Image: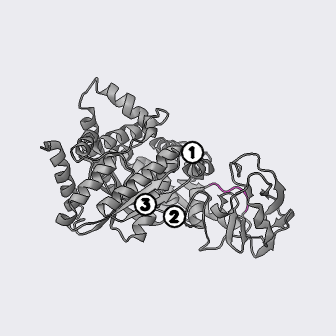
Amino acid sequence: MKSKNVLDIKSAVKESISKANLEGSCLLVAVSGGQDSLALLHVLYSLQQELSIDLVVAHLNHNLRGMESKLDSEFVSELASKLQIPCVLGSSDVQSIKDNKKLSLEEAAREVRYEFLSNKLIENAADAVAIGHTFTDQSETILFNALRGSGLKGISGMKEMSFMSTHGVSVPIFRPFLNVTRDQTYEYCINNDLKPRHDSSNDQESFTRNRIRKQLIPALKEFNKNVEESLIRLASNASEANDFIQSCAKEIYGQHVTFYKEKVVINNDVIELHPALRSGLILQALEELNHGLKNIRQIHVREIVNLMLGGTGKLINLPNGIEAYTEKDATILSFKKNKSVISIDGEYMMKIPGITDIPGWRINSSFENTIDSNFSNKDHTTVKVDKRLAGNPIWVRGWQNGDRMQPLGMEGTKKVQDIFVDHKIPKIQRQSMPVICSVKGIIWVAGCGISDWAKVIDTDSPALTLAATEISIK
């Protein structure tokens, strides 16, 4: 006989689907093969006929655990076939993306995963992505954000239905397990003869989230055995407060903030507002400039407030290449502008080997041995590509609206405009970034990395080395 806990999972998911108005919808189910995603898939499968829902299984191989990752993909594919559910698989070189974008491994994996899910959502005409985040995950997320110094938004935790913007696409994220514990999903798997895969990376205490799970929460339970429930209540209260503050800030935003020539101008009279309302306005201003609040913490808001109080002429540097400075009775938020911007007009055939001068840049090409697997310097101004590309004409031009390329480690193509955003290239500088092309497409965008199809295949022979150096124009 099944326990009450197992029955509760099914009723919790039914209630969540009803509340989110997803009856009769198509759900893209993210399945890693672990106990939470496996339980989620099985529950949704058992509800298919009752709720008239269609399912598509999605699994991404991050290529971080060798054969273990490959076996996970095979496990998910075989399970979907057994249940007669369509399955879409993907593969990505997360380690390369981590190195190229200078992200943590966790950040790179998350970014790649959500981009994959976004693409598959569109391709399969699904209504939402279903993810197996649990009550236990929620408490860990709240602690993680609190430790990072997040404000109310960060400690509000995850919502059952939320929307994530991925390269201009609004992706509905559905989390029906937020009232279900990890112990419950484990029990559900046992009772339904499901044998989840074990992800060995969850045992590595080098990851912050794993240390929170294995060390911090058990320690906190010595003070309060119901600490996870307490954290969820805290998140609920924070969410309500944050929603109220942001709605109030939105009502008066236009009275205090203007967007002018790629700058956000905040009137310093906001200093007279209640601190919570003032913070809400500043966060909305940063979000408008930066198209999101990635890397922005409450400490940065406090730095801007201190700047407002400190008089004219001071300047502070913020994440994502943003700077803030005061001017008369206002505080200006803008992206840093280094030199005067020179647009690259026309096309310039490259000398290989040799030097090619274009407006603002010198491109040097040569053939060099590949000593290791690192084919790009940190800022992507020197790269190594397949020497066979030199057999056909290669030219340099400026960025054009609509340009697409296949970033290293990705299967599909991506707008260069979105790649500029990923690498935090300010709008004002994008027309001056060299784009190196061949008949096959874009080989390299200086400052942003190479195309996957252009990478070095034979490491035993010389590679075509391309280096871009900014030069002064008199």
Q: Magenta residues?
A: 336-340
Amino acid on which the number 2 mark rests in the picture: Phe
Taking depth in this image into account, of 419 and 110 the one nearest to the observer is 110
- Front tag of 3 and 1: 3
Q: Secondary structure beneath disc 2? A: strand
Q: Secondary structure beneath disc 1? A: loop
CA gap, disc 3 and disc 1:
47 Å
Residue shown at the point (41%, 48%) measured from the top left: 279
Query: Which residue is the site of mark 1?
Result: 311
Instruction: Measuring from the top left, give residue 3's x and y in whole percent.
Output: 14, 42
Amino acid on which the number 3 mark rests in the picture: Leu
- Front tag of 3 and 2: 3
Query: Which residue is the site of mark 2?
Result: 259
Count of labels in the image: 3
CA gap, disc 3 and disc 2:
33 Å
CA gap, disc 1 and disc 2:
22 Å
Q: Residues within 10 Å of mark 1 (few under 14, many from 20)?
A: few
Q: Secondary structure beneath disc 3? A: helix
Q: Is residue 25 placed above or below 186 in the rendered structure?
A: below
- Between disc 3 and disc 1, whose residue precedes? 3
Q: Can residue 304 be seen in this view?
A: no
- Between disc 3 and disc 2, whose residue precedes? 3
Residue shown at the point (29%, 60%) measured from the top left: 83
Direction top: furthest residue: 222
